[in-house]
Image: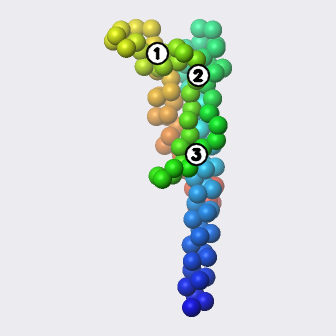
Amino acid sequence: MAEFSEYRSNKRQLIAELRQAQLEGLKKTGKRVVKSAKRKVRKKSHDLEKSIEMKGQPKRGPNGYTLEIGSDLPYAGVQEQGFKDGRKYGYTPYMGPALDEEAPGLTADIKEILNY
Protein backbone atom coordinates (compact mmCIF):
# COMPACT_ATOMS: atom_id res chain seq x y z
CA MET A 1 0.00 0.00 0.00
CA ALA A 2 2.85 2.40 0.77
CA GLU A 3 4.17 1.95 -2.77
CA PHE A 4 0.88 3.19 -4.30
CA SER A 5 0.73 6.33 -2.16
CA GLU A 6 4.40 7.02 -2.95
CA TYR A 7 3.60 6.61 -6.67
CA ARG A 8 0.69 9.07 -6.40
CA SER A 9 2.86 11.57 -4.55
CA ASN A 10 5.64 11.28 -7.17
CA LYS A 11 3.09 11.60 -9.98
CA ARG A 12 1.66 14.82 -8.49
CA GLN A 13 5.15 16.24 -8.04
CA LEU A 14 6.08 15.37 -11.63
CA ILE A 15 2.90 16.98 -12.98
CA ALA A 16 3.58 20.13 -10.93
CA GLU A 17 7.16 20.27 -12.28
CA LEU A 18 5.94 19.83 -15.85
CA ARG A 19 3.35 22.59 -15.48
CA GLN A 20 5.94 24.94 -14.02
CA ALA A 21 8.32 24.14 -16.89
CA GLN A 22 5.52 24.82 -19.41
CA LEU A 23 4.81 28.15 -17.76
CA GLU A 24 8.46 29.25 -17.61
CA GLY A 25 9.16 27.95 -21.12
CA LEU A 26 6.20 29.87 -22.51
CA LYS A 27 7.39 33.09 -20.85
CA LYS A 28 10.90 32.60 -22.24
CA THR A 29 9.63 31.88 -25.75
CA GLY A 30 7.16 34.77 -25.47
CA LYS A 31 9.99 37.21 -24.76
CA ARG A 32 11.75 36.04 -27.92
CA VAL A 33 8.54 36.42 -29.96
CA VAL A 34 8.19 40.02 -28.73
CA LYS A 35 11.81 40.81 -29.66
CA SER A 36 11.42 39.22 -33.08
CA ALA A 37 8.14 41.06 -33.79
CA LYS A 38 9.76 44.36 -32.82
CA ARG A 39 12.59 43.66 -35.28
CA LYS A 40 10.16 42.79 -38.08
CA VAL A 41 7.53 45.55 -37.70
CA ARG A 42 7.68 48.57 -39.97
CA LYS A 43 9.27 51.44 -38.07
CA LYS A 44 7.74 54.58 -39.49
CA SER A 45 7.15 56.27 -36.12
CA HIS A 46 8.32 53.45 -33.80
CA ASP A 47 5.00 53.67 -31.89
CA LEU A 48 3.88 50.22 -33.01
CA GLU A 49 7.29 48.73 -32.27
CA LYS A 50 7.23 50.15 -28.74
CA SER A 51 3.68 48.93 -28.11
CA ILE A 52 4.32 45.22 -28.82
CA GLU A 53 4.32 43.33 -25.52
CA MET A 54 3.19 40.29 -23.61
CA LYS A 55 -0.27 40.96 -22.23
CA GLY A 56 -0.07 39.88 -18.61
CA GLN A 57 0.93 36.43 -17.45
CA PRO A 58 0.27 33.12 -19.21
CA LYS A 59 -3.16 31.72 -18.46
CA ARG A 60 -3.80 28.06 -17.78
CA GLY A 61 -6.60 26.47 -19.74
CA PRO A 62 -7.83 22.92 -20.37
CA ASN A 63 -5.11 22.30 -22.97
CA GLY A 64 -2.18 23.98 -21.25
CA TYR A 65 -1.05 27.57 -21.03
CA THR A 66 -1.71 30.46 -23.39
CA LEU A 67 0.04 33.79 -23.64
CA GLU A 68 -1.28 36.86 -25.44
CA ILE A 69 1.27 38.97 -27.31
CA GLY A 70 0.48 42.03 -29.39
CA SER A 71 -0.29 45.72 -29.49
CA ASP A 72 -3.30 47.74 -28.40
CA LEU A 73 -2.80 50.35 -31.12
CA PRO A 74 -5.84 50.57 -33.41
CA TYR A 75 -3.82 50.10 -36.61
CA ALA A 76 -1.79 47.11 -35.39
CA GLY A 77 -4.14 44.59 -36.99
CA VAL A 78 -4.15 46.42 -40.33
CA GLN A 79 -0.35 46.50 -40.27
CA GLU A 80 -0.28 42.74 -39.65
CA GLN A 81 -3.13 41.53 -41.91
CA GLY A 82 -3.90 44.33 -44.33
CA PHE A 83 -7.17 46.07 -45.09
CA LYS A 84 -10.51 44.24 -44.99
CA ASP A 85 -11.28 45.43 -48.52
CA GLY A 86 -8.44 43.30 -49.85
CA ARG A 87 -5.90 45.97 -50.75
CA LYS A 88 -2.54 44.26 -50.98
CA TYR A 89 -0.30 47.21 -50.16
CA GLY A 90 0.60 49.11 -47.04
CA TYR A 91 1.04 46.28 -44.58
CA THR A 92 3.93 44.22 -43.33
CA PRO A 93 3.19 41.11 -41.26
CA TYR A 94 5.30 40.99 -38.12
CA MET A 95 3.53 38.88 -35.46
CA GLY A 96 2.89 35.82 -37.64
CA PRO A 97 6.47 35.65 -38.91
CA ALA A 98 7.84 36.23 -35.39
CA LEU A 99 5.70 33.39 -34.03
CA ASP A 100 6.69 31.11 -36.91
CA GLU A 101 10.34 31.87 -36.20
CA GLU A 102 10.33 31.50 -32.41
CA ALA A 103 7.55 29.00 -31.53
CA PRO A 104 9.60 25.92 -32.47
CA GLY A 105 11.97 26.83 -29.62
CA LEU A 106 9.26 26.32 -26.99
CA THR A 107 9.94 22.60 -26.68
CA ALA A 108 13.66 23.23 -26.29
CA ASP A 109 12.96 25.88 -23.65
CA ILE A 110 10.81 23.46 -21.64
CA LYS A 111 13.42 20.70 -21.92
CA GLU A 112 16.13 23.10 -20.79
CA ILE A 113 14.11 24.08 -17.73
CA LEU A 114 13.53 20.40 -16.90
CA ASN A 115 17.24 19.62 -17.51
CA TYR A 116 16.05 16.99 -19.96
x then y, percent, for residue 12: 59, 70
In the picture, the disc for residue 72 is: 2
Secondary structure category for the residue under label 2: loop
Is residue 62 in sight in this rendering? yes
23 left or right, relative to 85: right
Badge 3 vs badge 1, beta-carbon distance below 8 Å = no
Please say if 43 is above or below 99: above
In the picture, the disc for residue 14 is: none
Q: Marks 3 and 1, how far apart in space?
A: 26 Å
Q: Which residue is mark 1?
A: 78
Q: Nearer the viewer, mark 1 or mark 2?
A: 2
**Residue drawn at (40%, 8%) of the image:** 89
Secondary structure category for the residue under label 1: helix
Q: In which quarter of the view is residue 32 placed?
A: top right
Q: Which residue is mark 3?
A: 59
Q: Nearer the viewer, residue 68 or 115?
A: 68
Q: In which quarter of the view is residue 43 placed?
A: top right
Badge 2 vs badge 3, beta-carbon distance below 8 Å = no
